[in-house]
Image (spheres, rainbow, N blue to C red):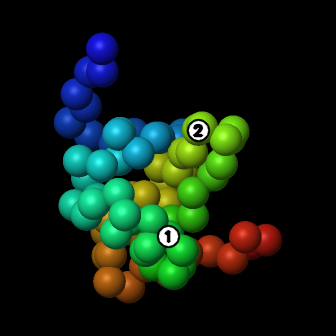
Amino acid sequence: MHKHIDTLPLVGHSRWKQIEPFVGVSRETWRKLCLAGRAPRPIQLSSRCTVWNNGEIHLYLADPLAYAAKSPGA
């Protein structure tokens, strides 16, 4: 059973189902935005578990059109 959350935590990491209500695009569109560096980079924890940094999601949500993902080494 998944509980519905009304806000995204400011810190920590979240899976797709947790960020989906906030990003306003489909999973495939989100994947393409991430690949293009126009959305936060995913963090692959295992072959079946991907998360995103909540702080980066909040930066994205503040201004989606101007967001640029940080370089992997930054």
Label 2: few (<14), some (14–19) or many (≥20) C-alpha neighbours in 10 Å: few
Q: In which quadrant of the rendered view does residue 62 lie?
A: bottom left
Position in image of residue 39 (x %, y %): 45, 71
Q: Distance between the residues labelled 2 and 1?
A: 16 Å
Position in image of residue 2 (x %, y %): 30, 21
Q: Horizontally, is 42 left or right of 59 in the view?
A: right
Could you say whether the residue bearing mark 2 is in a helix, strand or loop? strand
* Residue depicted at x 23% and y 47%: 21
What's the mark number on residue 49? 2
Question: Does residue 20 appear in this view?
Answer: yes
Q: Horizontally, is 3 left or right of 73 in the view?
A: left
Name the quadrant of the C terminus: bottom right
The amino acid type, in three-letter code, at marker 1 is: Cys
**Viewer-closest of 2 and 69:** 2
* Residue depicted at x 27% and y 60%: 26
Label 1: few (<14), some (14–19) or many (≥20) C-alpha neighbours in 10 Å: some
The amino acid type, in three-letter code, at marker 2 is: Cys
**Viewer-closest of 47 and 14:** 47
Does residue 73 sit above or below 49 in this rendering? below
Q: Horizontally, is 19 left or right of 41 in the view?
A: left
* Residue depicted at x 50% and y 70%: 34
* Residue depicted at x 45% and y 79%: 38
Question: Does residue 59 appear in this view?
Answer: no
* Residue farthest right in this picture: 73
The residue to which callout 1 is attached is 34
Q: In which quadrant of the rendered view does residue 1 lie?
A: top left
Could you say whether the residue bearing mark 1 is in a helix, strand or loop? helix
Position in image of residue 29 (x %, y %): 34, 69
Does residue 32 sit above or below 27 in this rendering? below
Which is nearer the N-term, disc 2 or disc 1? 1
